[in-house]
Amino acid sequence: MKDFVKEVLEKHFTLDDSIKIFQQSPLLHYINLKTSAVYSNTKARRSLANLYAVYAILYFYTQDFYSDKGKYKNFDGYEYTKLFRFYRSLYGGEKLQNHALNSRVNGEFKNKIVKEYDNDLIIVNNGKYLLHIEYLYIENHDISKIALEIIEKYIELLKAKDSHLLMLLDSLIKSNDNKNK
């Protein structure tokens, strides 16, 4: 578990409970997997498409259905265009394509997190998309807001990393000493 993931979990649970929640949550494992670029160099692949596909659904879910299993079970899903526009508006998402919503998340999720016969993370329902309810609850805790917070922390860390790089580049450009260039 990455440090910032652990930090977010410990804001909401005790140390023991945060470890237990993480261990039981395929959704949190997937988010943890997709946030590796924060510890890599600036050229590392950020995996924003798959992460933002999950984030977009989580974002609207927390507004509309947080801790309301019954209402969510009757929900058909969010329109593709609503989700796509939303995640393209996020930091670094301007050029993302639609593949994450259509199949990539589920393929990777089943390949790296759960078993092939387990449920898909994203349910595709006639052009509408929703997260499988099984992955939103751990021991009757709706973890969607925590998952959102972890992704938001990741984006915050990426922004800081980018800002630091830009600052370094700017100082090199402004440097009068040719040896520093």
Image (cartoon, rainbow, N blue to C red):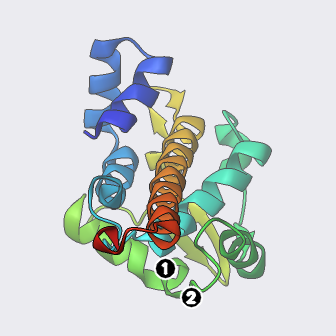
In the drawing, what numbered circle is on residue 58? none
Residue 9 in picture, x, y percent from top left: 42, 27
User: Which residue, given by chain and number where applicable, does mark 2 sit on?
Assistant: 97
Residue 171 in picture, x, y percent from top left: 49, 62
What type is the residue that disc 2 sits on?
Answer: Gln
Residue 109 in view in this figure: yes
Q: Is residue 165 above or below residue 21?
A: below
Residue 64 in picture, x, y percent from top left: 79, 47
Q: Residue at x 69, y 66 (%)?
A: 77
Rendering quarter of residue 159: bottom right
Left or right: 94 in relation to 115: right
Q: Residue at x 67, y 66 (%)?
A: 90
Rendering quarter of residue 14: top left
User: Which residue, given by chain and number where applicable, does mark 1 sit on?
Assistant: 100
Left or right: 14 in relation to 97: left
Instruction: Give the number of the mark in front: 1 or 2.
Output: 2
- For the C terminus, give its image quadrant: bottom left
Q: Tell me whether circle 1 and circle 2 mark residues in contact (CB < 8 Å).
A: yes
Alpha carbons under labels 1 and 2: distance apart: 7 Å
